[in-house]
Amino acid sequence: MPDGLKLYAPAYRNGWVPPDPMTVAEWADRYRVLSSKGSAEPGPWRTDRTPYLREPMECLSPSSPYRRVVLMFGSQLGKTEALINWLGAIIHLWPAPTLLVQPTLDMAKRLNRQRLEPLLRETPVLSELVPPARARDSGNTMFLKEFRGGLFALTGANSGSGLQSMPAAYLLADEVSSYPFEADDKGDPLENAEARTSTFPMGKVLITSTPGTRGMCRITHEFENRSDRRQLALKMPCCGAHEVLRWREHMKWDTPDGEVFAQCPACGERISEHHKTAMLTEAHWQPTAKGDGITAGFHLPAWCAPAGWTSWGQIRDEFLRAKTDPLLLKGWVNKRAAEAWEDEAVAAINADGLVARAQADGYSSGTCPKGVVLLLMAVDVQDTWLETTVWGFGRGEEMWRIWHQKIEGSPAYDEVWDQIDSIRKTQFPRQDGGTLTVRHCAVDTGGHFTQEAYEFCRSRTAEGVIGIKGSSNRSAPALGKGSKVDVNWRGRVIKGGLTLYQVGGDTLKRTIYARLKKDGTGPGSIHFGNDVTEEYLQGLTCERLVPKTVKGFQVLTWEKPSGARNEPLDLCVYSLASLELVKRRYNRATMWDQLEAAAQQQSKKPSDKSTSRRRRAKQSGPGFVEGW
């Protein structure tokens, strides 16, 4: 054989070698090494440690007829590790163009540093195939890595351009419930990413996530509408039956701090947690639906975690802490039960049901009941008036409506904004002595008087006045991190300019409606004062979640009846958003202790009676007071 041909002979022979028949799980057991950077148990991978991952990884193997795999898991149960095992097997055994999508580019960078770089560096068979990244080596960068026979690209779902143009045989879509509904006006990011695989008949797609809110949750949509909905049936040590354990029906405890046990669904026997290892080892997945024939779906709650991970007692303690707070309970349902959050409270709330409760509140507008330690104010800007509410907050985010006013007049005039300043600087008396003043005032800047709102906030930033704007992202956080909106004539950001905060209105409206369902006092309760009007409560509860099809997805959107006024609800949203700003400046474990101490200290200071005294003007309509 000529010397020149000898150089290509190994590659030629390799081209005729059929793909290795091993599964993803077998590859991981033989080759995968876990790094201390991304694992609490570093060292060789053992599928037997998480036996419930074996079947999903087999479905990702070339020998499986399934084209799509959906993992709807609770937090920290190994779904991302299964994704990384599949990626390692692709690079080593089945090379082809591969696309890995995280919710954002920042999360993609974090995954690369914590999981992907250690995978490539510490797994010997992969370190030979993917050379270390070099500054001038375009074949191996943070977002693009080449290997023999293929490459994989890493991108964020918030980057529309990163999801287009590249054909891919394999798609790894991680935490899809956190994807935006649209990226860069280029359509749904998951749909765009999956379209990249359409030209590869043997391609496969892995979709993973913890769930979110029903109607807005991609992983729930994929699992319920396309997959065969597999549930993990554990082998019961008492009778040998294979059963699915559900929290409400089967997980029990005798006392709030006692041992948590499972009640066997088949025979009713009491099962202790130390049996869990054997129960998992002999467990199997049970399909509960027909599905589309190409999508295998797996649902796994946190109480199926391996021994030594999240314990039943820890899950019970989190549940008991969360069950009276809808916001905490939503997180528990998503991350522990691995189920979509249901907004059942929305349909049950109306103004009629709140009127009687308000009459028993025992305080009137303009005074701070015992328990109020923080005042937050919000301003809604309309074309011919400003509307404002002052909310009081106490331990556990208990809320009291302290003041609500509609100020007639165009926001183009300073005298209208001057009345906002008067309310903001008012010293509201506390029932147990002393006074409180507004700490933060959130002003909506999204109307027709944006510049006037900017100017009002800009000159009062040091006094706690902030500019806000509603986010169009339905899954946006309660309050964004803030961005500078003031620039100089060169287009450069002014260092001391106005910071504008995006508000997740959809997120906070769900919180408000869930808390309105809670009666009585304590964490999460909302009080209105015995002089609240029915008109105000109608404005607070007029919106409803309505199912709509948006970009091919069935989603729930907030809508109000034609002609209804929803300013009270918007103002409540803005006040809760500014509470997030307060939380960022305190240690959350001691925040309410510090606020209570500060309120008591302020109460000891002599107050200016001329400032705290307020003149009640005649009302022009129910719930709205004109003038001061």
Image: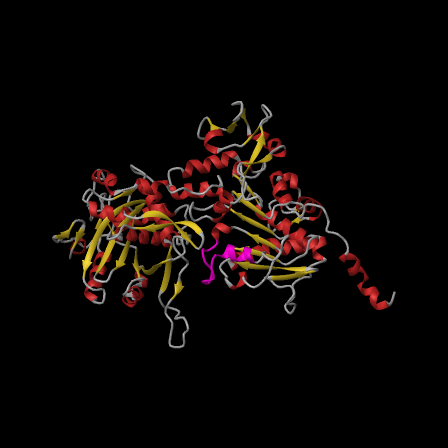
* Horizontal relation, residue 13 to residue 356: left or right: right
* Horizontal relation, residue 93 to residue 284: left or right: right
Residue at the spot x=63%, y=32% of the render?
Answer: 282
- x and y percent of residue 179 in the render? 48, 54
Magenta residues (range)? 179-195
Would residue 262 be seen by someone viewing this image from the given angle? yes
Give the residue furthest to the right.
1
User: Is 249 placed above or below 123 here?
Assistant: above
Q: Nearer the viewer, residue 435 or 248?
A: 248
Quarter of the image with the N terminus in it: bottom right
Residue at the spot x=66%, y=53% of the render?
Answer: 90
Mark count? 0
Q: Quadrant of residue 534?
A: top left
- x and y percent of residue 416 in the render? 20, 63
Q: Nearer the viewer, residue 84 or 149?
A: 149
Residue at the spot x=47%, y=28% of the render?
Answer: 253
Q: Nearer the viewer, residue 606 or 407?
A: 407
Would residue 35 be seen by someone viewing this image from the given angle? no
* Horizontal relation, residue 446 to residue 480: left or right: left
- x and y percent of residue 204 in the render? 61, 51
Is-magenta flag for residue 325?
A: no
Quarter of the image with the C terminus in it: bottom left
Is-magenta flag for residue 187?
A: yes
User: Is 348 placed above or below 257 here?
Assistant: below
Give the residue furthest to the left.
618
- x and y percent of residue 159 in the render? 50, 61
